[in-house]
Each structure stands twice: as C-alpha cells, then as structure tokens.
Image (tube, rainbow, N blue to C red):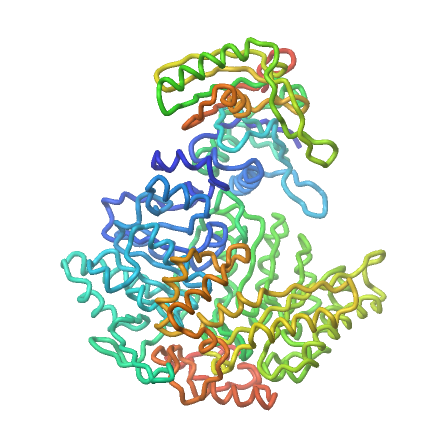
Amino acid sequence: MRSVRLNFSKTGRAIYVSHLDLTRIMSRAIRRAGLSMWFTEGFNPHPYLTFALPLSLGQSSDCEYMDIRITDDMTNDEILRRLNEALPDGINIISASEPKFDAKEIEKAMYFVKVVFENNEQAQQFYNTADELVKGDELLAEKIGKKGHRKVKKQVNLIDFIYDIKFSCAENTVNMQCVLAAGNTNNLNPSLLVETIEEHTGTEDKQLYIVRKKLITKNNENFR
Amino acid sequence: MLDERIQKILLKVQKPGRYVGGELNSVLKNADDVDVRYAFCFPDTYEIGMSHLGMKILYSVVNELPYAWCERVFAPGNDMEEKMRENNIPLWALESGDPIKSFDMIGFTLQYELSFSNILNMLDLAGIPFYSKDRTDLAPLVVAGGPCACNAEPIADFIDVFMLGDGEETTVTLIDLVRKHKKLGSSKIELLREIAQHKGFYVPCFYDVEYNEDCTIKSVTSKETAPKKAEKAVVADMDKVHFPEKFIVPSIEIVHDRVTAEIFRGCIRGCRFCQAGFIYRPIREKSAEVVNEQCKSLIETSGYDEISLCSLSTSDYTEIQPLLNTMLEWTSKDKINISLPSLRVDNFSDELMKKLTEVRRSGLTFAPEAGTQRLRDAINKNITEDDVITTVDKAFSGGWTSVKLYFMIGLPTETPEDVEGIAKLSQRVVDEFYRNPDRPKGKGVQVSISASSFVPKPFTPFQWEPQATMDELAEKQKHLNESVTTKKIRISTHLTPTSFMEGVLARGDRRLSKVIELAWKKGCKFDSWDDQFKFDKWMEAFDELGIDPTFYANRKREYDEILPWDHLDYGVSKQFLINENKKAHCAETTPHCRIKCAGCGSNKLNGGKCDALCKA
C-alpha cells in the first residue's frame, strides 16, 4: 500500500459542487477508474481518501489536494490518466506524486479575487477604502466558530489573518491578490474579507470571483 | 454552456449544483444536427427527479436517436424561481442551457397527483400558454406520461398528448411523428390526428365530455381519428427493450444516489388498494442474465457502490436466488451493496437475508398494510400475522434491531379494531425481539410504523370507494397514537389535507383544470412538500369556482357510473375490478397470479402473454 497525492483543479461548473459532494464524486471516479484502493475496515467500508483543505462552494482553485491509498503498483502517470478520464467536467487532476508535506503544515493560501461592481464609481470607492482599511490595525468581523460541537459567534480582527494583500482597480472591477491565513487553526475566507470591506464602503458587488492559487506551509514552501 | 445571466444568480441560491448540468454521462449534441429537441420535465426538484429510473430510461432512449436530443428540466426551488423572474430568465434545459420554449416537444412525467400545480408553474416560467387550445403552433407540443396519466383528466385541458403505459417504444413513435410533421410543415391538428391513431396515445381534445346535472359524467365521445378507448402501450420483451448502459451521475447528492435496475414489470399480487399493481400488468420479467449484465455496466460507468433491484415486489422475482448468486460474485469483491426494496414477509428466506448482509447491512422494511387478518383479507394482502412474526424473528436473529412497518389507515371496511390491530401487531414485533434468544445483545429494539392515509385510485378495485374524510382520518390517527403504549414503537403519519387533495386529483375530471389554474394563481406549487402545501388556497379556489372537492374524494360511486377514466384502456377489465370490489366487502381473498390466473384481462394488450403463467 502506498499513498498518492493528487493535485487537482476545480473550475467551471465544478465550483458549484460542495465539499461533501466532492468526496462522493471522487470516490465514484476512483471506482470508475478501476484503481485498487485501500478500503477502510469499519462497519461501512469505503475507499480511503482525505483532502488537504476544503474549498468553499463557488470558488475555483488550481491547488486542491487529495490523498488516496492504493494497493497495487500502478504508476502515478497511469493513475492520473485514468482518473481524468473518469472525472466530470470541471475537475481535472494536474499531477500525482508522493506526498511531501503533512496537511497540518498548511498555514496560508494565496487567492486572486475579482470584485465586479455596477459602475466605476462604486469600484473606485471600494478600492480607496479597502486599501486604507487593510493598512490599519483593526478590521473587525463576526465569524462563526465552534466551541466543542456548538456553534458560537465571535468577533475577530481580520488584520491578524492577512499576510499580504494588493489591490488594483480598472473600470468597474477591483482586483485583489492576497495571502490569507488558511488551515485548521486560523482561516480567513476571502469572501468574508470582501463582505467586511463592503460593510465599511456601503457598496454591493454584482459578482465575486475567487480563485485559490496556492497553499503555503509554515516554512513558506508551496504545499505539495 | 451556462448563460452568463444564470451564472450571476447561481451563487445567490441554495444548492446551485442543481442548475448547472454538465454531469458525468449527460448527453451533449449540436442543436443544429438534430431534427427534434425534447425537453423532459420532472415537475419536482432536481434531487427527486434525478432519482427516477423512468427518466433515465427515456433520456437514453431518445438520445440513442441521432436525429433527436433529449434534455432535462426540473422545477427550480423557490429562491431560484424568484431570481429567474426578477431577471427575466425563462426556464432552460440543463444540457444546452437553452430556453425550452423553442423546443419541439415538452414532456412532463406524472409521478404523483400533487405535482400538477408544478406543471403549470414550469409552463409559466418557460413562457408557454397553459391551455392546449391556446397553443396553436406545431411546436412546442406538450405531452405527458407516467402512472398518473391513467387519469389525467384534471390536466387534460393543458396537455396535447398523453402517453399511456410503457414509454420506451411510444416515445420513439412520438419523436418520429413530430419529426415527420415538422418536415412536412403540418399544422398541429394534422400531427394530433396521426398520433391518435397509434396505440399508447391519448389525445384529450379528441374526446368530448358531457356531464349530468348531478355533475357525474353523462358521456365521453371520441371524434376525429381517436379510438373509442385509448389503449396503453405494453413492452412485450423486457430483455430486448432499451435499457441505458450509462446513468447520468449527479454531482450533488440526490435522494436515491445509486444504481437502480428494474427486474420485472407488473405484479402477481393484486393487492386491492395498489394502483401500480394493476396499471403495470401483465407481468413481464427480465432474465437474471440480462439484469446482471445491465448492473455490471451501470456500476462500471457510474462508479456507484450500491445497486437497488427494483420492482413492485422484489422477492416475487422467479430468479431472485440465481440473480443474487451471480451478482455477489463480483459485487462483494468490489464492496458493492445490493439493496432489495419491496420485500414481502411471506417469502423472505434466511438465504435472502444472508445475501443482503454480505457487504453492508441496510434497513429492513415490510408492509403488512393492515392491522388485522380480516382487513388484510379485504385488501387482498395475502399475508398472515405469523408471516410477519416469522420474518422479523429471522431478521432479529440475523442481527437487525430495527424494522420499519408500513400500514395504511382509512382503508375501506376499516373499523376501530383494525386501527388498534396496527398497534397490537407492532407490539407483538417488539415482544418477539425480547423473546428471541439470538437477538443482538445489549441493544433495544426500534419498530417504526408508517401509517399513511389510504387514497382510492383509478383502475383499482377500490376506485368506487369513498375516501375517509379528513376528520375520520384524524380520528383514526389519534386512535392509533393512543393505542401504542411503548416508546419502542415510533409512529409517523401523513397530513390529512394532503391525502385529501391527492384523493381529489386522483379521481378528478376535466372540471378541475380551472381549479388547478386558480390554485396556482393563488401561489400553490410543490404541493407534495408539507412545508409548502397551501391547503387554504386550494379550498379558496374550489370555493370561488363553485366546485365541491368532496364530490371527488369522499363520494361512493355506483358500478354503473361513467368514471372520468373509463375511455382509457389499461388492460384490466372493469368486470374484474367489480368482482374484486365485491370480494373485498366479504373479506374474501384472491390467490396470486402464479397460483391461479384471476382473469384480470391485462394480457390482452400483450398478445395474450403474461409471465405469471409462463414462468410459474
């Protein structure tokens, strides 16, 4: 038995697939691909698979990672080829390789965000305020956290979760490139950041595009 | 190929995966390369519609034709509907993203009566006039089929053509006729005239209905090319009829997220309340070999890990043991689960049970239907209390600690003792658990009772019976709840207004079209969803139009009354149904079709052939 890490993208129609549905899609694709998988040995045996970091519904990504365990000596290239044949539109395996880092080592993620507004003025307004806000010391937002199994609301300072952020503005669109805290301990969803900025600017976007570009470890290496 | 306008609203609605298409094995064609574009509409949500086997079969049947393209359409959720109306986005088909208004044919599947209001809502969202007479062009032709087509009179004014019976062959006939007349540049009436001449079609505008003063039907007269009685279509050979090699595999979770394979059509049992048991006759089995091959192919192309072998009574399949043996050779190796819905308590063997637990243990459900032997005899269920006890005993020995039992309340001839009988029988099941020395140790037992309300349906021996009123049903539910004294028995029941509306529509006539339209105008849709059902709006609609709904639900009909569906021929003879009705009132049973042919007459539509006789 060996572990294989699959790097895949989630784009187009597949961005409307939730994380839970994605796990089902993957286990069916693995069956169709005819990989000899290692099955969990519980009451309800299923092929073992685990994801590095779930992606929110509606976001696309080039840096999704899933680990599987296979029980024969099929090559990584063959696994990649077979899985791509079996996957639906919008999910594409980019590479298959031996896992390098533990998912626990993920600390941040890089995103490209495009915020489209009704008109140029709104975009400009967002752009001006956003730049100021993220340079400040405090940008408060309400986050739903977990205390044991209970869900609790808590106030967080988003500045603590921003590692790097750049804005640019063109016509009715603001582009934002950012590195935000990501992983199990600290995590900032770019949509919450945009939403919070909009509360301050009083603007409302028409369309929000978020692409996850990279997962980065504590030692500033690209997750792989 | 998602329209940009659709993309913009997708992230503002729940479960956007319902609306994007592009699932594995969905069929894309070039619209310019086909002659007929068909929008197959399921008048409920994506998750429900995509679970339906019939849609998968017919989707594949049409898409096999190089000159036709079948696409899927579902009822959008309320949040999506709101966004669509706000942004003037008409109802579109999932494959192409094109508005269905421009299609050649629009088909609705009629799985339950309470979906009728959704049909109007979908037509409205598509921008298509409701009434057949208001659609004067050749396209789109609005058609419908499925079990409720056996009495589709309440929506007869909206639909151009009904497909009666099995759809695999009639769908192709219909596509071919549409194609031919489109090429000829015919008028709609010319197309309808030709359709009406073929078996398996009912063109409602070719039948004039006259009423008596008491609102019963005086006469139904066929005109144009229509036959006096429209016959349902019957597929003769289940092994040869088209069955898909691939299923569309939804990207989001649906209700029945698994491979479904049909093992036979029809039923040998003749339970008197069961519409499916009569309208799908005669019995036609698929061979075990064919079922096995079809399942294999579907598992390979879908990647599912569960197969459901479906039919009206799975343990009655003559080849059930050989089939399971063959299938288990490959399914257990690949950890694929086989589930058998619709098992009977009188032929649930140890062997069958062992096979069911080979990979994963699934739930066990049995349907005694009634609480006392007298009532079970009246409905011709043909099982005894001992059958039930022996079976649950086997299940408890086999490791199960919970069973589900289906019952009905409001059955004809039912007395308070019969209702108490449900509680008594369930209590015996609980007691049996504790008496069983082989029961799973250290665990309690859970018996879930589902007590649904009986709704009399067309083409059954109970088609003349009055439905129990809402008050009576509520009283029976109360009585049942009070008769159960332990928490080990859990009872669930149906809302009585829902059952009442189902009863009204099930045996309704053409006068109900106006009511459905008005109810829809008042906001009725998704009537089968308890949280969306607006009973008061329905009653307002009846009231404003001066139509009494109890006339349809709660009235006893005489044998000689002309029923709204009498001009449709589903094979089973009216005389047979009358005899069965009379026997019900004497609590007299009819043996199942393999013991003795009951002479229902359904085989006449299948060249005299019925597998209950050949395969006995």
Q: Dividing the image into 4 quarters, which one contains the N terminus of chain B?
A: top left
- Whether residue B63 can be seen here: no
Q: Residue furthest front?
A: B544
Position of residue B123 measured from the top left corner of the image (x, y, whole percent):
33, 55
User: Is any atom of residue B12 visible in this view?
Assistant: yes
Quadrant location of the C terminus of chain B? bottom right
Q: Position of residue A105 (x, y in %)?
A: 66, 19
Query: Residue B121 versus residue B57: which sits nearer the camera?
Result: B121
Residue under the point 48% across and 23% down: A211
Left or right side of A181 for B152:
left
Q: Judge whether B539 appears above or below B424 on screen.
A: above
A45 on left or right of B79: right
Using the image, determine if residue B464 lies above or below residue B151: below
Along the line of sight, which residue is nearer the eye, B526 or B319? Answer: B526
Percent x, y of residue B529:
52, 57
Instruction: Provide residue A62's location: percent of width, then percent of height.
Output: 49, 24
**Residue A140 versus residue B109 in the image, above or below:** above
At horizontal 28% and vertical 50% (from top left) the residue drawn is: B101
Image mark count: 0
Is residue B19 left or right of B395 when viewed as pictured? left
Q: To which quarter of the image does residue B574 belong?
A: bottom left
Q: Residue at x 42, y 32 (%)?
A: A12
Task: Name the one closer to the observer, A57 or B310.
Answer: A57
